[in-house]
Amino acid sequence: MTAATATREGRAPVVEEPMSAKVLRVLGRAPIHVLLVVVGLLWLVPTLGLLITSLIAPENFADGGWWRVFTQPSLLTFENYQSLWDTQAIRDSLLTTVWISIGGTLLPILVAALAGYAFAWLDFPGRDWLFIGVVALLVVPLQMALIPIFTLYNKVGIFDTIVSLILFHTAFGLPFAIFLLRNFFIGIPKELLEAARIDGASEIRIFLRLILPLGLPAIASLAIFQFLWTWNDLLVALTFGRETQPITVAIFSQLRQFGSNIELIAPASFVSLVIPLAVFFAFQRYFVQGLLAGSVK
Amino acid sequence: MWSRYGVAFLFLLPAIIFLGVWVIYPAIYTFFRSFFGQSGFDNFVGIDNYKALFTSDLLVTAIKNNAIWVAVVPAFVTAVGLIFAVLTERVSWSVAFKTAVFMPMAISAFAAGVIWRIMDQQDPNLGAINASIAVVKDAINPPGVLSDAKPSSDNLQGTPSGGITLQNPVQPGDVAKLGLTGIPPTEVPSSAVQAVMPEPLQGGINGVVWRDFKPGGGNPNEVEQDELGLPDVDLALFDSNGDQVATTTSADDGTFSFDGLEQGNYRVGIAASTFSTPFEGVAWLGEKLITPSLLIAYIWIWAGFSMVVIAAGLAAISRETLEAARTDGANEWQVFRRVTVPQLLPVLSVVFVTMLINVLKVFDIVVSLAPGSVQDDANVIALAMWRTSFGGANNFGLGSAIAVFLFILVIPILLLNVRNFRREA
């Protein structure tokens, strides 16, 4: 088959472009390619700077910028990571972050899936108004809750616990989560649900066996969002924690002496961002899907 | 009846409890709390807290700064995202570009602050931004060999910043002696060698610029043993009208030469560029530039979000309308301006409004990027709320008022959202 007759997906044959025109076209677009390469690299530089800074031994910090390693690769060392790992407080705070993120991801998904199913497929008076009300809560700044919940946690005695942080994250994740899941669930074919109901399946059974599996793509998007949101949180943990310090708060407490603590701040910051980054790269598709679904609010 | 709606109620119950206890009840509590003083509900103060919002310097700064954020960030992020989305539309490797630009979205705003704090360091040897500026600036205006010096005799007059000029006129065949003192040994260029008194030059002016100082004294204005020549000094020759007619630089032994001169009176001077100081770095994290630095870092984070959402909108635009416009003779810019952008308007407004909400609540990045000493200058509403309530002052009354103020600012956006939502539903 020659190039001129090659057709893709049954489209009309493409008339072959003369070589000269092709060269001109590519050359004409060259500035765009160059611009994109430069901008793309510029976008990566700051993060690269953190990574390299985290790999420079403390005694070499003051001598010059991190870009020296391109000419002096021998400056690179894992020393900072070693001493970071040897710091009990940092290990503890990483573990705290992990627990908060797991709880703060699973609990809101469960609660939101239940509510999302009710809003999508169960009939009750005022359903749509109630749903609009929930969506409206999306915009309530969490600053509105900090003071009363601070007081409440102290009264109930769960201040400064991982559970108290998870509960707060759950509540403030719910409006978006319910919105996202309800809109996804409502797209599940009605026939499937009706068939299950005729077969006498209970609502909870339908929810567990039908809705959750079919809703998995939306749940995955949501899980990534909740995970990133809770993992990256500073404000909530700073307010409701003292000893319970996730990694962001642990770094925050070192910021006062930025210059002298950089050998701890840089690797700790990089560790704190490498996990969300891995999650993001692994599940980029779901992340973007969730973003687009959420943006149409 | 109960059995019919009871199931729905049970499914909703956990969500109702969470939203009721953690969102709705606190919102109401905070609203009422804002009318009471620091000590609690026994101390009704009316709208005093709200008055403080607009009179206390700290809070006024926070509101002003947040206004700058609102004015700059949503527009910039939307525009940058639009440009990136359009540029990458027909580029085969756009995924790589998009990934690079989108990546900061996965990073916490807090960590992004740390990242930019490393970028923004003032010392050009440490901060990448100032290092880049230094490269450009040194190429245009290279630093001089000396930072400071004084004339060693009354024949020389002037200051480093304005240039140092020999007072008595010289004529071709004369030798110009420019002795300098007040130069620390560490600042003498390493290539300097013993100064040499040059021979007179027929039809030209020879001269020497040297460090007119030797340990243990020596005679001023005389080139002596152990006195070093000053290399790379910029010298200028002026005619009797004061116009500059020639320039040169000195050799390692301090000698220099202007040749091919017509008869007449000249003056020789050391140009101010000899003393131009190296670039000391822009204080990105200082009180003046901290907010612009924060805005740059924030746009760096969010440009990817904007780009991805707008790219999705771009992909959904009907090709027919674009083709029709092109067939009608519209050029690419007209197609973009008159066909693409109007169809993208809903998506652009989504990005803009999302950024508006984000910017009003900005907190983490200010905490991590702004050093403690400039946090008053970098203050924003959410940070002021936190610092007032939990950062030492512990004034829950004023803190509540700030939170309510923040809430009031987002209510118009909330109404907009609800309206859009109902229109879609």
Image (spheres, coloured by chain):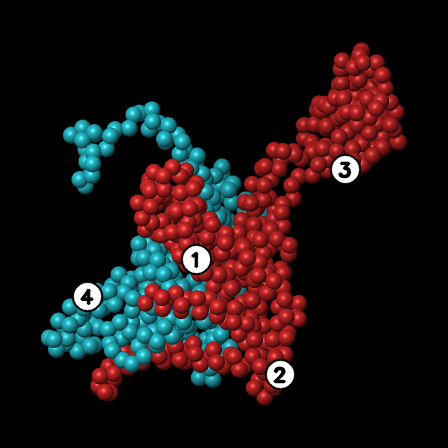
Where is mark 3, residue-wise? B161
Q: Earlier in the sequence, mark 3 or mark 2?
A: 2
In the displayed structure, B298 sits above or below B276; it is below
Tell me which residue sits at (38%, 70%) in the image.
A135
Task: Check disc 1 and report the residue beneath it.
Answer: B349
- The three-letter code of the residue at mark 4 reads Pro
**Subunit bearing disc 2:** B
Residue at the farthest top position? B202
> What's the CA distance linking mark 1 and mark 3?
53 Å
Look at the picture and state if B180 lies above or below B341: above
Question: Is tag 1's residue or tag 3's residue first in the polypeptide sequence?
Answer: 3
Snapshot quadrant of residue B201: top right
> Which residue bears the numbered disc 2?
B45
Chain letter belonging to callout 4: A
Tell me which chain appears cyan.
Answer: A
Crowd band around label 2 with a 10 angstrom C-alpha radius: few (<14), some (14–19), many (20+): some
Q: Mark 2, mark 1: which one is toward the viewer?
A: 1
Q: Residue furthest left?
A: A199
Q: Estimate how packed mark 3 is, as few (under 14), some (14 to 19) or many (20 or more) residues with alpha carbons within 10 Å.
A: some
Q: Which lettered chain is shown in red?
A: B
- The residue to which callout 4 is attached is A189
- Type of the residue with mark 1: Ser
